[in-house]
Image: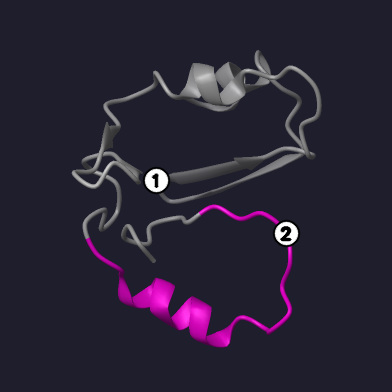
Amino acid sequence: MGDVDLTQLIDLAGWLSKHHDRMFWTAPLHGDHDVLGVLGGVGSSTLDSGGCFFSQPCLFVWHRVDLTSVLLVEYLPTGCMGRVVSLGAGREY
C-alpha cells in the first residue's frame, strides 16, 4: 500500500521516504473511520501464537529487537508523549 492508496482512505499529514522505506502519518482520526479494518487485510500479517501481536514476514527484523531500535529508545528524551508506531522493532518491544 502506498501514499496514493492511503489517500483514498484518509488525508495524509505528511510522509517520509528513504531507500526502500516509506512512512506516512495523519492527524488524529475522529469519527467513523474504518482505516484499520481496511489496512488489516493488506499483506500477509499474522497473529502471533500468544494472540497479542500482528507481524508480517519480510519486515525488517520482524522476529527480534534490532540494535538501532535499542539505541533509539536509549536516547529518546524522557517525557515523550503521544501515539507511536514501531518501525522495525521486534514484537514485545
The color scheme shown is: one colour
List x then y, in percent, for residue 78.
68, 84
Q: Earlier in the sequence, mark 1 or mark 2?
A: 1
Residue 67's disc is none
Judge left or right: residue 31 versus residue 47.
right
List x then y, in percent, for residue 76.
61, 81
For the image, the number of numbered tags is 2
Q: Is residue 2 magenta?
A: no
Quarter holding the C terminus is: bottom left
Quadrant housing residue 47: top left
Q: Residue at x 73, y 37 (%)?
A: 26
Amino acid type at image mark 1: His
Looking at this view, is 31 or 69 the one in front?
A: 31
Looking at this view, is 86 or 12 the one in front?
A: 86
Name the outermost residue toward the top. Answer: 8
Q: Residue at x 52, y 19 (%)?
A: 37
Amino acid type at image mark 2: Gly
List x then y, in percent, for residue 31.
80, 22
Q: Foreground mark, 1 or 2?
A: 2
Dot 2: few (<14), some (14–19), or many (≥20) neighbours within 10 Å? few
Give the residues drawn in magenta, as a range.
Answer: 64-85
Name the outermost residue toward the front. Answer: 50
Q: Residue at x 23, y 43 (%)?
A: 48
The residue identified by callout 1 is 20
The residue identified by callout 2 is 82
86 relative to 6, above or below: below
Quadrant housing residue 10: top right
Q: Is disc 2 placed on a helix, strand or loop?
A: loop
